[in-house]
Image: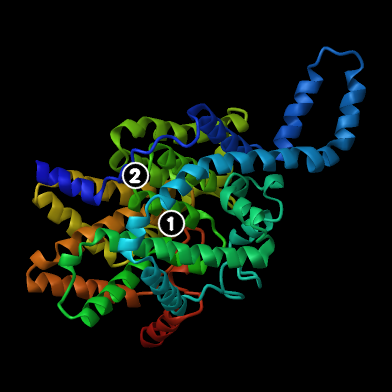
Amino acid sequence: MSYLTDRYQKYVSFNNSLEADIVPQKYFWTAIVIVFAVANTSVDRIHKLIFIVLQNLPVKGIENSLIKYEVEKAEIGIHYIISIKGFLFFVAFLALACPIIVSVMRSPSFWHKLGIKRIAVAAVYFFLALSLLAFPYSYPYGLNAHPSGLSGLGLSYGKMSLSPFAESYEIVARRLLKPAIAYFIQMQGNLLYYLFSLICIYILIFMTLVFLESKISSKHRIGENKLIIYTRKFWVYLSVMTSSYMMVCFQWPGYPENISFILILLAACLPMSRQARLGIVALCMVNHDGSAFALIPIILFCFPKQERIPALFTVVLFYGIWFFSHGLNLHKGLASHVVVGNHSNWSLLTKNPGLAVAGVFFAYKLLWFLLLYATQRLWSQGEREIALAIASITLFSLVMLLLAWDTTRLTGFGFLGMLIALVVVANDYSQLVISQRQILLAIVSANIIIPSYNILLEIPDSLFHYPYLGIYKAIEQIVQLVLP
């Protein structure tokens, strides 16, 4: 049993730090409430709230005040409400980020042992290699592509970065963190926000390498020759990064979830205090509300037992404030998610089940077989806790398919489970028979050349047409010539 516990701690559990709280607890929880409230409360809702309060004041002649407020509310919003929201968010953000920064800074031995400079350089090579597969500039071919380089809703986030605390577009307004960071560091507007998104892609690649290199034991690495080791590792890592959690960042620059993925990988790699982990949960939620479907299984399987209830409560608190901001009207809150055009997302899902399955497949392509192999091997070895953790972390994000139509992108929110599966297989690689090694390497290699389609339920053609420039587009065109 101790062996199983050791392996679970190695592969699944997040490393704990016994550091004392940086921020007093009452201030820390206040900061969480503030960022959630700012993200979920638009200026229009604040105006409505103020109007209701004024309307119910038992003051004679209040009608004149209401008329004056209605006339001046735009100026009040610009000069007061937006500024107050921005100031409160900035202060609360610093309070939540501080424990995370301290945990990163107090791990010099981790970074030194890992070889941070080597990984930083390697991340550049992987960025370039992935750019050759799918260039992160799809104008004019990509979905709602813009000359700035942003695509899809990325354009809305780019616009939001100009004044994130004034945003009223329901879907993007509460996904505040990434546009707010761009705003604070003066990377505002479509072009600069696009460049900021490219930086975020690089950091995500860097953190993926940090995770893999810190978890895969050197004694299990393939081969004896260093050139063989590094070459195979390069192709294996590149194959993993063609999964949707990474490739969608290249196809649709500007989307915010890569910030959440970076924070999750930080928690998975570094020893952290309970406050730092809780800060990561809060910031992930205010970055993208769908982060809950990545976080819930991670909290249940990876967090220390005593931290699970506060972390889950943080997720629930976000949705509680969101629910309250919609006047306790669930239908109104979900309307922007479950309806696409004139169709509900559920009707699209039931109408095109094959397209939905394809969307799920292309999230990890052939690496689904790696996941099945890893979980089956762990299960047969009696290590069912690890197998269950990997499967849950990878698959729980599928719940989002009931609410949204970009199936490949949302399935990728469970990426951490896939990375853990790869680590398990890599560390057991020397114990496998030659035929098993060859099959696994063949799967990983073939996975690279399969184009990473980004399937959308509303657009059936997304399964047959690859609009993003690069080698994958060339492969698709060759296949269409051979198989018209």
Identify the image quadrant of the C terminus.
bottom left
| Horizontal arrangement in the rendering, residue 97 relative to residue 181 (left or right) | left
When asked about the image quadrant of residue 189, the answer is bottom right
What x and y, as percent, mark residue 426?
A: 20, 64
Q: Residues within 10 Å of mark 2 (few under 14, many from 20)?
A: many
Classify the position of the N terminus by image quarter: top left
Q: Residue at x 66, y 54 (%)?
A: 183
Q: Looking at numbered disc 2 in the image, what kind of residue is underneath it?
A: Ile
Residue 365 % position (x, y):
32, 66
Front residue (pair 349, 424): 424
Name the secondary structure under disc 2. Answer: helix
Residue at 36%, 83% in the rendered image: 483
Q: Image point 13% across, 45% down: which residue?
A: 4
Q: Which percent across, then down, holds residue 414?
A: 36, 52
Q: CA distance from mark 2 to mark 1?
A: 21 Å
Q: To which residue does mark 2 refer?
A: 298
Q: Position of residue 331 (x, y in %)?
A: 56, 35
Residue underneath mark 1:
407
Numbered disc 1: secondary structure? helix
Vertical order, 26 against 237 (above or below): above
